[in-house]
Image (cartoon, rainbow, N blue to C red):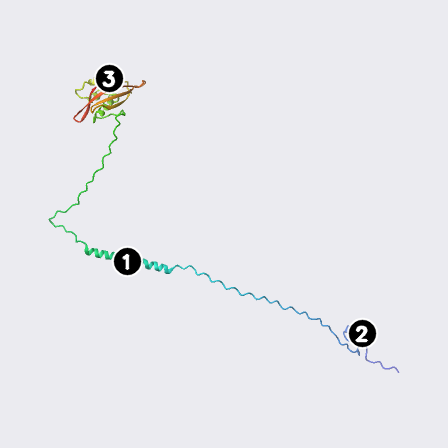
């Protein structure tokens, strides 16, 4: 008689491996699991300790106005002003005590007047003296012998008047009358110019050189000696030679 089949079945090793178990009835081998060492995480790098900040340098104090020096200046100025004011007041009050009383004029006394200052008026400008050696063409005057000679020649060549020429001569002069003088004037062409050079010989007698310039002709000149005379402060031509 066959033995009864054992109910204990043995699994195929492959199945066992698939199922992850050991064959039935076989001793389970000690499962050695090689536990791979866990990766040890590196400790987080800690930030390096920061160096302590250097303390800020104290700011230099702002320039403050030298209040003390200003106060000293003000005090000195005030003392100076006070001293000057005191000196001024002392002078005023001490001067008023010593001042002489004002003079009061008596009713009957005549008021005194300030002496008049003698002021000399400026001298009138004098005209420069004419050069006696200059050749004259002016109308002259009767203030001197030379002046009346210049006036005489001016009346002859410029005014061309016989009466004016004769009026500058003395009444008893040997010179011709006015009408004859006019005839001589008419013989001189109109437009003739002249120049007379008067040189004193004495206080009354003069050496005269007349330069005569007729139109279209060469200049001519002739010499004369003229005597003058003072009558009542006026000078006249007395004679011509």
* Image label count: 3
The reply, left or right, for residue 18 in relation to residue 154 is right
Residue at the limit of the structure toward the bottom, as seen here? 1
Reply above or below: 175 against 87.
above
Quadrant of the rendering where the N terminus is positioned: bottom right
Element type at marker 3?
helix
Q: Residues within 10 Å of mark 3 (few under 14, many from 20)?
A: few
Quarter residue 33 falls in: bottom right
In the image, which disc is placed on residue 184? 3
In the image, which disc is placed on residue 234? none
Sequence-wise, the earlier of marks 2 and 1 is 2
Quadrant of the rendering where the C terminus is positioned: top left
The reply, left or right, for residue 11 in relation to residue 61 is right
| 214 or 49: nearer the viewer | 49
Q: CA distance from mark 2 to mark 1?
A: 134 Å
| 118 or 158: nearer the viewer | 118
Element type at marker 1?
helix
User: Could you say where residue 178 lies in the image, as x and y percent from the top left?
Assistant: 20, 19
In the image, which disc is placed on residue 83? 1
Q: Nearer the viewer, mark 3 or mark 1?
A: 1
- Residue ID for mark 2: 13
| 24 or 82: nearer the viewer | 82
Residue at the limit of the structure toward the left, as seen here? 108
User: Could you say where residue 92 lies in the image, as x and y percent from the top left?
Assistant: 23, 56
Q: CA distance from mark 3 to mark 1?
A: 100 Å
Quarter residue 190 falls in: top left
Sequence-wise, the earlier of marks 3 and 1 is 1
Q: Residue at x 21, y 57 (%)?
A: 94
Q: Residue at x 28, y 58 (%)?
A: 83
Q: Residue at x 26, y 57 (%)?
A: 87
């Amino acid at each position: 008689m066959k033995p009864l089949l054992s109910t204990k079945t043995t699994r195929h090793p492959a199945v066992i491996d698939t199922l992850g178990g050991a064959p039935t009835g076989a001793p389970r081998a000690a499962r050695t699991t090689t536990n791979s060492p866990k990766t040890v995480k590196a400790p987080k790098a800690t930030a390096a300790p920061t160096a302590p900040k250097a303390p800020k340098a104290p700011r230099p104090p702002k320039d403050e106005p030298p209040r003390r020096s200003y106060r000293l200046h003000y005090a000195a100025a005030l003392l100076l002003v006070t001293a000057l004011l005191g000196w001024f007041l002392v002078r005023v009050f001490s001067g008023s005590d010593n001042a002489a009383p004002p003079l009061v004029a008596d009713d009957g006394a005549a008021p005194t007047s300030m002496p008049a200052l003698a002021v000399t008026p400026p001298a009138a400008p004098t005209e420069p003296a004419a050069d006696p050696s200059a050749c004259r063409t002016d109308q002259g005057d009767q203030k001197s012998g030379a002046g009346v000679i210049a006036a005489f020649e001016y009346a002859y060549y410029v005014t061309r008047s016989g009466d004016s020429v004769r009026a500058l001569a003395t009444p008893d002069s040997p010179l011709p009358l006015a009408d004859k003088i006019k005839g001589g004037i008419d013989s001189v062409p109109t437009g003739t110019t002249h120049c007379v050079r008067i040189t004193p010989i004495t206080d009354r007698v003069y050496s005269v050189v007349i330069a005569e310039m007729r139109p279209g002709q060469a200049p001519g000149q002739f010499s004369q000696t003229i005597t003058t005379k003072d009558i009542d402060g006026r000078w006249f031509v007395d004679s011509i030679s």
